[in-house]
Amino acid sequence: MNERVVVVGNGMAGSRLATELHARGEDLKVTVLGAEPHRAYNRIMLSSLLAGKISEPDVELAEVAGRGVDLLTGVTVTGIDRPTRQVLTDDGDRIPYDHLVLATGSRAAVPTLPGLDPLRLPERVIPFRTLDDCRRIIALAGHARRALVLGGGLLGLEAARGLAARGLDVGVVHRVPYLMERQLDPAAGAMLAGTLTGLGVTTHLAVTPTAVEADACGVRLALSDGRSLDADLLLLACGVRPDTTLAAAAGLAVERGVLVDDRLLTSDRRISAVGDCAQHQGTLTGLVAPAWAQARVVAQVLTGQDPLARYQPRPVVTRLKAAGIDLAAMGDPTGGPGEELTFVDPARGTYARLRIHDERLAAAILLGDNPSVGAVIQLFDRGQPVPADRRALLLGRAVGGAVAAPAASPALMPDATTVCQCNTVSKGALVHCWRGGARTLDAVVGQTRAGTGCGSCRDAVTGIVDWLSRTDPVEVGQ
Ligand SMILES: Cc1cc2nc3c(=O)[nH]c(=O)nc-3n(C[C@H](O)[C@H](O)[C@H](O)COP(=O)(O)OP(=O)(O)OC[C@H]3O[C@@H](n4cnc5c(N)ncnc54)[C@H](O)[C@@H]3O)c2cc1C
């Protein structure tokens, strides 16, 4: 009998796992159960949908349902019966498994505040996590003048920028004295706040909300400094909590997330966990690149394609997806030993801070127009030695040796350069795919998946495919 794999969650990790299993294992019977009613969609593109840069069909993910994979949407798994190896669903079914994968993701955190019942949020108070949340925000924004965003982290700022792009006056309330404190330092945070002001977003820093009053007409947010802010809608971007409910109820080892080893196995060898809900080596990832890398490892192990496959975390690069703001951050620029390089141009809103340790880039913040951003990301990602002429890193001057600005020319880019961070696709893999017969952008993207995550590498992928189409394939790479 075919091995039965059941996946709980049809989000970014669960849907990718189904695709990976389908691509590798004809002998598996895969069932995906998703609580959301929709087809699988690209959650990270919701920021672009909110900003009006793309429309709903653009966020749909390619699906393998019906091709060896049973997909049940709008079905919530309510329990795991480990002794009989079955999952229980809210429509009363019991579905047997030989191997179960939890891909239950995260939920938006709702702050504990008078006036906010997490189970019955007022109509004009909306978290930003799902497609339905996004639809409700867009519908309300259509008749709104003012919006408030609670939380000045990455998600809150992308949402704020998106609402401002729809013509709303937007205020961001953040409890820390500077924005994006997990990625930035105070100077970069202050410069980012200045950039946002120019884009129609006001920031209220170092204040906490004390109460929410909301009715059918509007929302009032009371603040710890005694002020009250009024708006037509309040968007909650106060962080996420891994959804560990099922795992905990089934007695699996859970801390902040479901504990997994390098094979993504939980404390029950018949159950794996991937994506936002998994905690690996003490870390919750909360990002799509690790979720997709984990899905690949589980597929390799379950199909027997590579029983020794192990998940190895990679360095994380954070980029803000907000029109008019160029921001990349990696590592912790404020902590740890090393040599510091900074360049500040307040008039142009440009800030660069790099920390170098043992001739390697340990951390960086690049805000505004920094021509070296591509080269800096590559250096960080690959752990390569930095150039002796440090100005090249700060100012984007001609860089010798192994580091080249990726935008300059695909021909100069080393094959090992990671072009797509979300899917870990190198330039070499794109060239290999081209040589294998994929002769259009769609074909190369379809086979490698480059550009299908956050989309920030699409121009680079297009540039490489253009370059390949202009170059005799036989000569490429010689
Ligand atoms: C607006 C926004 C922008 C983002 N931008 C970025 C970005 O630029 N880069 C980046 O790397 N990350 C970004 N993220 C984070 C990224 O989306 C997540 O890391 C990713 O979605 C994690 O995938 P996942 O499958 O683990 O969880 P999810 O995508 O949350 O999917 C989990 C799914 O499981 C379902 N589920 C839960 N419990 C059950 C159950 N009991 N039964 C059935 N189904 C269940 C849920 O309904 C959900 O559909 C962003 C997130 C948001 C909201």
Image (tube, rainbow, N blue to C red):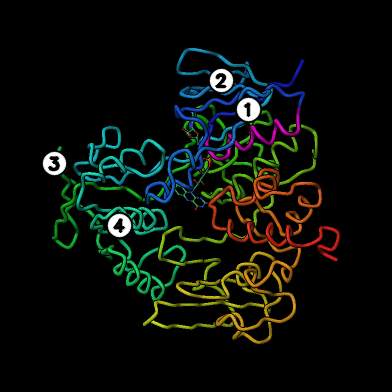
**Of residues 439 and 273, the one drawn nearer to the viewer in this rendering:** 439
Closer to the chain start, of discs 4 and 3, is 4
Q: Which residue is mark 4?
A: 164
- The label on residue 87 is 2
Q: Is residue 398 above or below residue 138?
A: below
Closer to the chain start, of discs 2 and 1, is 2
**389 with respect to 9 (left or right):** right
Instruction: Give the magenta part as a residue range.
Output: 11-25
Marks 2 and 1 close (CB-CB < 8 Å): yes
- Amino acid type at circle 3 is Cys
- The label on residue 68 is none
**307 with respect to 77 (left or right):** right
Q: Which residue is mark 3?
A: 217
Mark 4 Cβ and ligand 1 under 8 Å apart? no
Q: Residue at x 44, y 39 (%)?
A: 56
- Look at the image and tell me in which quarter the C terminus lies: bottom right
